Image (spheres, coloured by chain):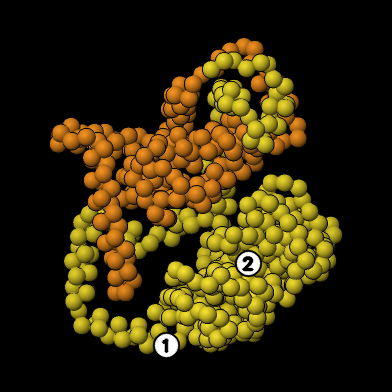
Chain colours: A yellow, B orange
Amino acid sequence: MAAMERPDFDELLEKYRKGECTPQELDFIESWYLQYQQDAEPLSQAELEDEVASITESIAQKMPIVADQPPVFRRLRLPIGIAASILVILGIGYLRSPERQKDQSVAQQAELSISPGRQAASLTLANGKKIFLSDQQTGKVVQGAGVTITKTSNGELIYDIKGTKNKASGFNTLATTNGETYRVRLPDGSMVWLNAASSLKYPVSFQHSAERVVQLSGEAYFEISKDRKHPFIVRSREQQVEVLGTHFNINAYHDEPDILTTLLEGSIRLRPERGIARILKPGQQAKLANGDLKILEADPRTATAWKDGHFRFRNESLQSVMRKISRWYNVEVIFQKGLPEDTYSGAVTRHSDIRQVLDIMEGSNNIHFTIKERRIIVSK
Amino acid sequence: MTAYSNYTDTELAALLKDGDHQAYTVIYDKYKFLLYAHAYKKLQDREDARDAVQEVFVTFWNKRGNINAQSNLAGYLYTALRNTILNLIARKEVRTRYTDAMAAHYTSDYEPTDHGIRSQQLAALIDREIAALPAKMQEVFVLSRKAYLSRKEISMQLGISEATVDRQIANALKLLRARLTLVAYLLVFFNI
């Protein structure tokens, strides 16, 4: 390979950014990279541990890192081969046991009705303690260093910070699984509605930071209390939204192709991980797909219907509709081949049995749903 | 110590490809310090280094389906991190510190090399960086090297190729995993 002419290095980086480098240029950059800063002073063990702990914490927000909650079989101290043999034997016993017959009939009964999601969530405190909110009585959930967390009679979670020199610190995480939804009033008075299979991480107190930063995974609707001196920032998959005081919805599920941010009131600045920040006006929706940001006019009612207890679709694909249904009813959806590529529009309550929802869809389209345990099979 | 941490990188990569969360966690735990130390060295900025390492691991999960299990995992992660760091550098507004260093590299000792040599250089760099980690953080790599040796021993004793050993391990794992899924289900059922 021939050596390249001495390039303008700033231009070279620009070409790298755009992915326009020739093989020779890439070779040079990679060769430079290998030796660059190789003799730099390494961090100490304690510093490495600190830094990596903070990476783990933020990755755990969006990733299935299971270190904190080992699955059942990981707790066994037996060598895995022996454990497996014992359990396979147990398993054979189970397959032949009469109880299984009973279980199957229970399962068949369950086919008849799949109930909708409910108001429930888990709250993970700064000290790692996890509280299941559906099991909690109304009243004080936690009372600790400068902060009281209360559950109101309508199930809302409220943070109350005592005093100005409070010691409240650390993060709380409110998380829902499939079939759960929850509402929280943050210490600054902002309200957040969390949709199913989502989580929100926020500091226990905003008092000592210039910005109010929270981390969202999944979907949530925000009503942010006005505080121009302390911008509210929502970080989510591939973007961050900066807010002064406003109402908006973010849909950033990992299994959705697009990240949708819909503004109802006020104004927000949306900063994608790559590219230029854009300002949204009420009634607009930002669609981030593969790093490409588009601003469209949208019907905010469609985007936020979930928080008012409805499914509302507007020219949505079958796949998109079924993803929403699967999160709320906690079911798996299987698509058979050759389905019509129709789109769906309409509204239906989220509080009815799944069959009612599916019947409505069947009625208006050339499509059929079969429920098998917690699976929905979609066929022609 | 879990059974997973005895797996070789190839086995872990194969499990990961099937969406195995624990394999992901073990890979993360194994490489997190090494990759962070590397990113910090290159970027000399803790926050940038955190962002880069985080991006690499998040993408690693999201693109798990495309990961080639036969390739070496350390090399794959280092290359992903390098590309992330170079992108980060190229996106910076002020980058004279990098362009100056490039100019110096160009004049002093740059010789074009082919791809094979470059990956050998990378392998040597990874070894050096593992050796430079605090002793406690090196242990995982020493352990997996032992596992690698024993596989070599198996192949010598049985007179079969290492590829065959690999394939048999993969088959055994597949079977075991299928059984374990059943087992986990049963455990929940019986509340063991």
Residue drawn where x is 68% and y is 77% of the image: A305
Residue drawn where x is 68% and y is 63% of the image: A260
For this view, does B191 lie left or right of residue B125?
A: left
Q: Residue A77: where, in percent of width, then height? A: 28, 56
Mark sitting on residue A112: 1
Q: Residue B134: where, in percent of width, then height? A: 46, 33
Q: Residue A328: where, in percent of width, then height? A: 54, 75
On the same chain: label 2 and label 1? yes
The mark that comes first in sequence, 2 or 1, is 1
Chain under disc 1: A
* Front position in the image: A176 or A202: A176
Above or below: residue A274 compared with residue A355: above
Q: Which of marks 2 and 1 is in front?
A: 1
Residue drawn where x is 58% and y is 79% of the image: A119
Above or below: residue A4 compared with residue B150: above
Residue A82, quarter of the rendered image: bottom left
Sort mark 1 into few (<14), some (14-19) or many (20+) by Cα contacts within 10 Å.
some
Kind of residue at disc 2? Glu
Contact check, label 2 and label 1, Cβ < 8 Å: no
Q: Residue A58: where, in percent of width, then height? A: 58, 52
Chain under disc 2: A
Residue drawn where x is 18% and y is 76% of the image: A96
Q: Mark 2 points at which residue?
A: A219
Q: Is residue B6 visible?
A: yes
Measured Cα–Cα span from mark 2 to mark 1:
29 Å
Kind of residue at disc 1? Leu
